[in-house]
Image (spheres, helix red, strand yellow):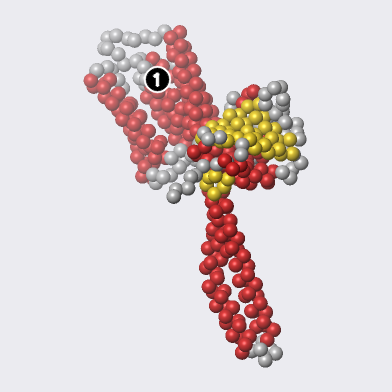
Amino acid sequence: MADNPSLRSAQFSPSSRRIRLQTLVRLRWLAVAGQTITVLVVGLLLRFPLPLREAAVLVGALAAANLMLSVWFPTTYRLGPKSALALLSFDLLQMAALLFITGGLANPFAPLICVPVIIAFASQPLRHSLVLIVFALVCTTVLAFSPYAVPWYPGEELRIQPIMQLGVWCAIASMMMFAAFYAYRVSHEATLLADALAATELVLEREKHLSQLDGLAAAAAHELGTPLATISVVAKEMERELSDDDRFREDVQLLRSQSERCRDILRRLTSLSAENEEHMRRLPLSSMIEEVVAPHRQFGIAIELIEKGDRTAEPVGNRNAGIIYGLGNLIENAVDYAKSKVTVMVEHNAEWVAITIEDDGQGYAPDILSRIGEPYMTKRPREDERAGGLGLGLFIAKTLLERSGASIHFGNRDNGEAGAHIHIEWPRSVMEVRDSK
């Protein structure tokens, strides 16, 4: 439960970072519009000397490439890492060429060369993004040696000193690397979180499905009862008619006995479901805790259950698959890391319900406590490493319990005792369903 392989596979994967072509196409149309407006304003409105023909060719090349992509591929097409790298490299080269003929690093729009790099780090695998940032740094370096002057007033020359060129290069390079790292980390963590939440929904649906199997069994027993009764009646008639025929007597008796056996099985199944239907739908707090704890008593670790409060006053609520799975996951982790004993303490009063889980293991390391509950968290330290990981499994448990209305606190035991301490608390109104009469 704590580290299910099927749940690990739901985490971050290369396929989850495939950018949709339509998204990139729209960004490129925005770039085409921005470059066109800038060229027209600088060349026609401000009347600065500008190589309009060359600039128009570069902007037109970007527009033509964008138009071909829109025609050749459907809007839902997703780019692989190599295809995305090729398109972003083309965008970077086009932007660098346009800057090169309009002043290089002296052009106030030079920092825009960082845009393709940021898009790559936000949407592509790291190794492909690193290739692009190296290419971008090479283009930025080439821009520093542009022989073309910045478009300026006729008769005046805007000269940029070499030291200023170096400063601009350093500013663009540092901004490019910082923005790329920031975009990658934010995108990476957002993808992990989305995949972990998807895995949480899968777990919850599975638990609900298991809870509904009892009702499905009762429905199946009810539906099968009528045709089986018909078979039993026909078998009796056949037995009466063929009782004197040695060829069919044993076969007919076998058919009747087996049909009666099937009816008995379905009868027991129906009665079992009817007896336990209320138990499956409504659970006292003590029954829910015992259902959670029971599967973990067979692993050589003593589990002590302490109930503080009168059972006659305990809350009774609807069976919540999320709470049962979440608590089971936390207890399983405690059993995995305990040396010899796990303590589960249950408390309740008129206002709240609380469950405390403690183990006598090594407890949480300080760096783990600061990041606990993240879907990509590292392991708790343990010599035999048998507990797997505390990442996705613990995240799912924490998410499901918080969705049920609980507040959760992770820490270590007090009074100098070794071991982890988890405190879960709900408002009593959340854990209790009152009968409406």
Residue 71, given in percent of the width and then of the height, sits at: 36, 44
- Front-most of 233 and 205? 233
Q: Residue at x 67, y 91 (%)?
A: 244
- How many residues crowd mark 1 within 10 Å: few (<14), some (14–19), many (20+)? many
Which amino acid type corresponds to the residue marked 1 in the rendered image?
Ala
- Front-most of 201 and 46? 201
Q: Is residue 385 above or below residue 290?
A: above
Residue 7 visible at all: no
Residue 402, given in percent of the width and then of the height, sits at: 52, 36
For the N terminus, give its image quadrant: top right
Of helix, strand and loop, which one carries label 1? helix
Query: In which quarter of the view is residue 355 placed?
Result: top right
Q: Is residue 220 left or right of residue 254?
A: left
Residue 27, given in percent of the width and then of the height, sits at: 37, 33
Q: Is residue 256 above or below residue 1?
A: below
Residue 312, given in percent of the width and then of the height, sits at: 59, 43
Q: Seen from this angle, which residue lies furthest bottom?
A: 244
Q: Residue at x 39, y 46 (%)?
A: 74
- Front-most of 135 and 410? 410
Residue 2 visible at all: yes
Reading the image, the residue beneath label 1 is 110
Q: Residue at x 44, y 24 (%)?
A: 114
Q: Is residue 402 above or below residue 251?
A: above
Q: How many discs appear?
A: 1
Q: Is residue 296 above or below residue 48?
A: below
Q: Seen from this angle, which residue lies furthest left?
A: 45
